[in-house]
Amino acid sequence: MTLHSCVERALEANDSLAQERAGLEEIRGQVTQTRAEGLPRLDLKGSWSRARDPSFALDESFGGDLGPVLEPIYDALAIPVEEGQFGLVPDPSLIPAQTFYRAYLETRWEVQPTRLLRLLRAVRTALAQQEMVVKDLEHRTVEDVLAAYHRIVLAQENAQALNAELNARAEFLAVARRRFRLDLAAPLDTLQAAVSLANLRPQLRRAHSDVRAAGRDLNVLLGRDADAPLSVEVQFPIEDESISLEAALRLAQQRPDLERERLETALLRIQRGVQKAQNHPFFTVEGSYGYVAREVGNLGNEGLDTWRLAVTLTLPLFDGRLAHGQIKETEAALRRNEFGQREQERIAQAEVMAAVDALVVARENLSAAGLNMEMAEVAFRQMTRRYELGKADQLDVLNAQAQRFSARGNLIQARFDVLVGTATLKRAMGVSPASTLAQSIAQATAGGSADD
């Protein structure tokens, strides 16, 4: 796999990214739910009921005594009235149970425009905030992929350097043995060469273990099984463009994690507005239309329709200071978030400064390591010839070998530091580590011109 294909694979298959992208779908679902609050609810209902209710027959207005109006009429007409007989309704004990069938459409629409508009703003802000979370995680994932990729190359280079050094020391041991057989070297010289060779073998085993460990880390980032076979192309995309600290700090102001903090502040302000809107007047519209009948077959017959329409205006007067307490809590959370936002901005600023300094040092170290490697290689070749000619002793050659090996290790590490430091600086500036420094510089320049 190339570096580019690893980055593409991680952006598509990384499990942490998949989790945060699923969070985007959750918030989109909340947007749909919030919009539903502004729409009426419509239900189709059917019901069967059977009940006996004699309560109205117990009211003196309708039953019991005849009263001052009917009593003279009954007396004048000589209508006999037995004791306890009701005047207008039957005796409660005579009222039978009744069965009714109903089928109707019912709707309810609660209109709270100020609350609804603020809720929609809140979920849209939450959606933008989650997008910043995903973007920030994408940048960090790419940075981790680049670091893991280069760790594989670093570990493999170390293993190759150790192999080369083992071969060189094995050759030196052979030379020492030939000199010993020719009585040109002491037994101690041969022993020192053998010990020097043996001491490298544990380091080689550790280097191979480091290669496998780095491969496992990269596999996990790519969404693959840790033990899946993996082969990467050796690449050293060294970028030597320089970027000023001012430009880097300007870019960092638009970092996704800082934007997320700003959106969190905006979200809390909207939440405060939603809580205030709970005490605003609102309308409720309720209605129903359908049929009621004693038998199912009569549902829908003319004259059996029933309907109801009601519009209610609610003016909230007192909620036990619930909204006041919620607003007070939100304002405290808002102040806390503003403090946290300023702290995150300062941390980001310090991170950019450290990344710029680290990259400058890493580049200087790489330049020096390259020069030292060349000098150590020349010194080792010269010392080997002098030893073969008897003009240098065993210790001189071993020291030259150690210096060359150390110089090669420093060069490998310095190259790794530059590659990883460049990716870290890009991420700290708020741009994708997969982009080039030239693109970042152009973006910073364009931003500066726009600001001016």
Image: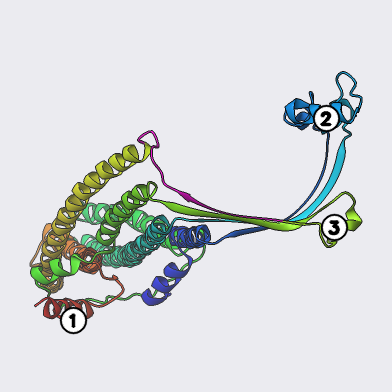
How far apart are the two marked residues, 3 and 1, measured between alpha carbons?
Answer: 75 Å
Of the residues shown, which amino acid type is indicated by label 1?
Answer: Ala
- Horizontal and vertical percent for residue 51? 82, 36
Numbered tag placed on residue 299 in the rendering? 3
User: In x, y percent, where is residue 180?
Assistant: 22, 60
What residue appears at the point 45 percent right and 65 percent down from the top-left corner? 222
- 175 or 420, which is in the foreground? 420
- Let me know if residue 387 appears in the view: no
Q: What residue is pinned by disc 2?
A: 87
**66 in relation to 291, above or below:** above
Picture quadrant of residue 355: bottom left
Q: Residue at image x 45%, y 62%? A: 24
Q: Nearer the viewer, mark 2 or mark 3?
A: 2
Look at the numbered disc 1 and give the secondary structure of its residue: helix
Please tell me whether mark 3 sits on a helix, a strand or a loop: loop
Q: Is 165 contained in the magenta span?
A: no
Q: Quadrant of the N terminus?
A: bottom left
**Left or right: 115, with 353 as reference point:** right
Q: Amino acid at mark 3?
A: Leu
Which residue sits at x=26%, y=44%? 331
Q: Are marks 1 and 2 in contact (CB under 8 Å)?
A: no
Q: Residue 316: within the magenta?
A: yes
Q: Estimate how packed mark 2 is, as few (under 14), some (14 to 19) or many (20 or more) residues with alpha carbons within 10 Å.
A: some
Image quarter for residue 443?
A: bottom left
Image colouring: rainbow
Residue 442 circle label: 1
Tell me which amino acid carries mark 2: Gly
How far apart marks 1 and 2 lie (CA) works out to 98 Å
SS at badge 2: loop
Question: For the magenta stretch, what is the residue range?
Answer: 307-321
Which of pointers 2 and 3 lies earlier in the amino acid sequence? 2
